[in-house]
Image (cartoon, rainbow, N blue to C red):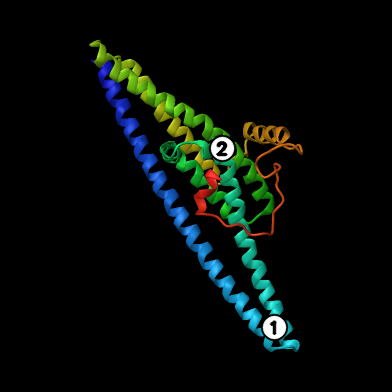
């Protein structure tokens, strides 16, 4: 009797954890919508500035035209900085997706992966996208790579737990034996603890706390030491741990499309 009660409680907690996952996916979709809308507006303004600059430079050859060009150049610089954040965010998403070889997976697996890890992707995305400090951007590049490795491990754990839970329920029914409620409770508890661990990590990343304690700082330093040689990230467009920012703009098929590039 007691094992059934514990199993029921574990199931309720697991259901709450799944609800958190749905909410995280909803938040990620909203972040994607806001960022893409902002980038679309920036691109539109940029085109207006470029057209105005062409008209002024073709019609005015005096000092006033030069002053206006300087003003427009400052506007270009401000827009490029914002757009470069978008590019850095896309590259960060690429590193996360490639850690799990997401491009090679089937669409069904990609959707499951996104559902299970949308919270971590969202927190890392917002941290990089809205950070103005160059030193913090470099730090967040490393954090993004570390998150990719954590997501890879967590996804395997999620799949193992789900398969084990299904087997522990279906197998006794097929063999006409007793269901092991203790095992089910244990597996559901593992699932809930894994979700809780991700939620804590999401909170620390979103608020810029990740890497502030001794353990996480050592983890970041160790990752840099392992991936700082010239041969690292082969297949990642030859990017090093701190890739140089490229001024050339790249076309992206949606913000989250970077996960499978």
Q: Nearer the viewer, residue 66 or 202?
A: 66
Rendered location of residue 83, percent (x, y): 60, 61
Q: Secondary structure at mark 1?
A: helix
In this view, 63 is above or below 224? below
Q: Give the image quarter of residue 11.
A: top left
Who comes first in sequence, dot 1 or dot 2? 1
In this view, 123 is above or below 59? above
Q: From the viewer's perspective, tell me whether residue 6 is left or right of residue 190.
A: left
Specify few, some or many for label 1: CA neighbours under 10 Å numbering under 14, 14-19, or 20 or more.
Answer: some
Q: Secondary structure at mark 2?
A: helix
For the residues marked 1 and 2, what is the alpha-carbon distance in whole angstroms? 47 Å
Specify few, some or many for label 2: CA neighbours under 10 Å numbering under 14, 14-19, or 20 or more.
Answer: many
Rendered location of residue 95, percent (x, y): 60, 42
Asked if residue 208 can be seen in this view, the reply is no
In this rendering, which labeled residue sits more in front, label 1 or label 2?
A: 1
Reading the image, the residue beneath label 1 is 57
Dot label at residue 206:
none
Q: Give the image quarter of residue 24.
A: top left
Rendered location of residue 62, percent (x, y): 75, 89
Q: From the viewer's perspective, tell me whether residue 144 is left or right of residue 11.
A: right
Q: From the viewer's perspective, tell me whether residue 205 is left or right of residue 222.
A: left
Q: How many marks?
A: 2
| Residue at the image point whose x is 30% and y is 14% from the top | 180
In this view, 72 is above or below 136? below
Q: From the viewer's perspective, tell me whether residue 197 is left or right of residue 81.
A: left
Q: Quadrant of the N terminus?
A: top left
Q: Quadrant of the C terminus?
A: top right
Circles 1, 2 touching at the beta carbon (< 8 Å): no
Reading the image, the residue beneath label 2 is 148
Asked if residue 252 can be seen in this view, the reply is yes
| Residue at the image point whose x is 44% and y is 33% from the top | 196
| Residue at the image point whose x is 47% and y is 54% from the top | 32
């Amino acid at each position: 009797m007691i094992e059934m009660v514990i199993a029921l409680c574990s199931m309720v907690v697991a259901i709450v954890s799944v609800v958190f996952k749905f909410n995280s996916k909803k938040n990620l979709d909203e972040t994607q919508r806001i960022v893409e809308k902002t980038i679309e507006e920036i691109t539109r303004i940029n085109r207006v500035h470029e057209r105005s600059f062409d008209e002024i430079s073709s019609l005015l050859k005096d000092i006033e035209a030069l002053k206006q060009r300087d003003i427009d150049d400052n506007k270009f610089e401000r827009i490029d900085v914002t757009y470069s954040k978008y590019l850095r965010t896309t590259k960060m998403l690429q590193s996360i997706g490639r850690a799990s070889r997401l491009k090679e997976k089937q669409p069904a697996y990609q959707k499951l992966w996104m559902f299970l890890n949308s919270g971590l992707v969202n927190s890392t995305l917002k941290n990089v996208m809205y950070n103005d400090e160059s030193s913090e951007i470099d730090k967040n590049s490393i954090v993004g790579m570390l998150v990719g490795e954590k997501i890879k491990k967590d996804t395997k754990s999620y799949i193992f737990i789900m398969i084990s839970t299904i087997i522990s329920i279906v197998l006794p029914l097929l063999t006409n034996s007793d269901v092991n409620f203790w095992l089910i409770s244990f597996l559901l508890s593992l699932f809930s603890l894994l979700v809780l661990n991700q939620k804590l990590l999401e909170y620390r990343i979103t608020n810029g706390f990740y890497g502030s304690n001794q353990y996480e700082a050592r983890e970041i330093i160790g990752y840099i030491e392992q991936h700082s040689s010239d041969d690292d990230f082969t297949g990642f467009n030859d990017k090093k741990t701190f890739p140089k920012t490229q001024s050339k703009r790249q076309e992206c098929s949606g913000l989250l499309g970077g996960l499978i590039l």
